[in-house]
């Protein structure tokens, strides 16, 4: 990924650095823990939900 970044113009590198700084400084939401939720990464980020081998698209 770093090799891709060195091909970018300086303005793009500055924008990436500013975005990374904003993400670091963004407040984390104070969410209650989920009870009985799924294990592993959030399934909706992949655009579908899988339960017992059956995938359902949103």
Image: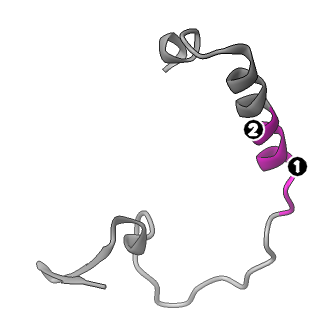
Residue at numbered disc 2: 20
44 sits to left or right of 4:
left
Query: Residue placed at 83% from the left, 38% from the top?
Result: 21
Q: Is residue 53 above or below residue 6?
A: below
What is the x, y in percent for residue 28? Answer: 80, 64
The residue tagged 1 is 25
At 84% from the left and 56% from the top, the residue drawn is: 26
Dot 2 and dot 1 residues touching (CB under 8 Å): no
- Residue 50, numbered circle: none
Q: Is residue 33 left or right of residue 36?
A: right
Label 1 SS: helix
Position of residue 53 relative to residue 25, above or below, is: below
* Magenta-drawn stretch contains 25: yes
Q: Quadrant of residue 49?
A: bottom left
Residue 48 is left or right of residue 27, and the answer is left
Q: Considering only order in the chain, which callout, 1 or 2, is on the residue closer to the N terminus? A: 2
Q: Position of residue 54 (x, y in %)?
A: 12, 83
Label 2 sits on a secondary structure element that is helix
Residue 51 in the image: above or below residue 21: below
Range shown magenta: 18-27
- How many badges with numbers are in the image? 2
> Where's residue 39, x and y in %?
40, 71
Q: Quarter-wise, where is residue 41 in the image?
A: bottom left
Circle 1 crowding by C-alpha within 10 Å: few under 14, some 14–19, many from 20: few
């Amino acid at each position: 990924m770093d090799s891709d970044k060195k091909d970018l113009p300086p303005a793009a590198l500055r924008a990436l650095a500013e975005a990374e700084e904003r993400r670091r400084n963004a407040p984390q939401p104070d969410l209650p823990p989920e009870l009985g939720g799924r294990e592993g990464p959030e399934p909706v980020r992949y655009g579908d939900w899988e339960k017992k081998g059956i995938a359902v698209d949103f």
